[in-house]
Amino acid sequence: MQHSWKRTFAIIWTGQFLSLLSSSAVNFAIIIWLSLETGSAEVLAYAAIAALLPQTLIGPFAGVYIDRWDRKRTMIFADGFIAACTLAMSMLFYMGYSEFKFIYLLLALRSLGSAFHMPAMQASVPLLAPESELLRIGGINQVIQSVSNIAGPALGALAIGLMDISYVLLLDIGGAVIAITSLLLVHIPNPEKKQEQQAGIKQVLRDLGLGIRAVTSNRGISWLFGSSTLVMFCIMPVAVLFPLLTLQHFGGGKFEMSLIEVVWGIGMLVGGGLLGIFKPTLNKVIILNSMNIILGISLASSGLMPPGGFILFVGLTVIGGIAASVYNASFTTLLQEKIDPAMLGRVFSMYFSIALLPSMVGLLGTGFIADYIGITQTFVILGSTVGLIGILSFFIPALMQLDAKTAQSSPAPEAEMEV
């Protein structure tokens, strides 16, 4: 049917929105709890490492199995695992074991589930919708994430103010249940298997090698991975320091911390909305490079603001959110267009690992950076580096030619409701 894929996406998006909203609220509540309890950049950096390192390490291997397994079931079991871990952690906090090590453990377990869920979701999109709609879908996905980023921090700040953290964690369980229910209502196709899949370690390593070659055989995608990794290396320490910049430099509190998260989400909402409405035909690599320049300028300028310039900081955060949203949607669409759907699970998993693993080094140095370089100077230095990467990327021919249009077009796949 002509509109069956739209109906499928509407159901999936509804469940994902409520799940993302609850996760955003819980994540921000944890950030507030850690920030107010310690005021330490080092503690926030360790929390970020716990939330990213597990999926970074197992990501490439998870991708192999994502491409082997039923993707719908993979997403359902990943959501269920995250919900079960969150429930166990909520019970520990309720019994009085509210220590940092349990927060780190919770974030690490959630990261394991995300290692399977996020790549499986991204790898399923080209099988559900026509290629001509992928950028628009990427924009709508950014809108959903943005609305979650707007409402989530406000909900998280309210929740942590009214409830103990053990009860706040329960919000995430409710969101996971809704996401699982929405997935049960739809059919998500899987790519055709060209041969019988075996589970031996040699075959897994071979499949992983095929995924690596899918990237390295295309110089443009290799450059795209490299530039994105450098940008991520710079952005991760800055992202960790955002709450402390608000608290320590601008003298803010819970409200100001929530406001910054909300306006970042508004920026992402605007960026995703623009892509969803207008579906630009401009070369996506030009879009990516331009967004890096804009994001770099917004971050560097934030570090130059005086303590009384909080309102300007809010405006710069909106601009950064717009740039990040457009970048994420365009990057995802490029990979979905250029990579065989049967390889997408391992390619997305590989990207998350390749981009995030070097960032762990940057996060480990966050405490040192905050104490010896200064939070504001960190924003200036790393923001300027991101902008410079965007400028230099215009001078890489293989990267600039990556989005060259081809005469081929893909037919719209069918995606029906299950009866």
Image: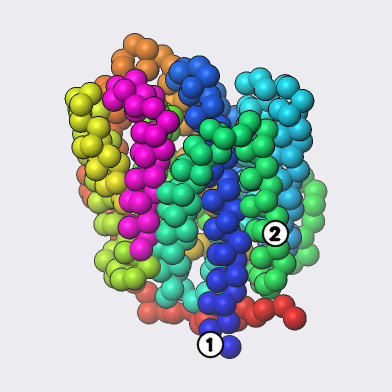
Which residue is at a point 26% across and 22% down the rendered structure image? 377
Q: What label sits on residue 10 in the rendered view?
A: none
- Majority secondary structure of magenta residues: helix
Estimate the x, y position of residue 172 in percent, counting from the top left.
Answer: 64, 45
Estimate the x, y position of residue 7 in percent, counting from the top left.
Answer: 57, 77
Which residue is at a point 53% across and 24% down the rendered structure image? 34
Three-letter residue code for mark 1? Gln
Q: Is residue 123 left or right of residue 393?
A: right
Q: Is residue 299 left or right of residue 143?
A: left
Q: Which residues are magenta?
A: 244-273
Q: Which residue is the site of mark 2? A: 180
> Does any portion of residue 91 appear in the rendered image?
yes
Q: Quadrant of residue 326?
A: bottom left
> Does any portion of residue 234 appear in the rendered image?
no
Q: Which residue is the site of mark 1? A: 2
**Which quadrant does the N terminus fall into?**
bottom right
**Across the whole image, how many numbered discs are drawn on residues?**
2
Q: Nearer the viewer, residue 57 or 144?
A: 144
Q: Is 297 located above or below residue 119 in the figure?
A: above
The residue most toward the front is 162
Estimate the x, y position of residue 339 in percent, counting from the top left.
Answer: 50, 62
Q: Secondary structure at mark 1?
A: loop
Q: Secondary structure at mark 2?
A: helix
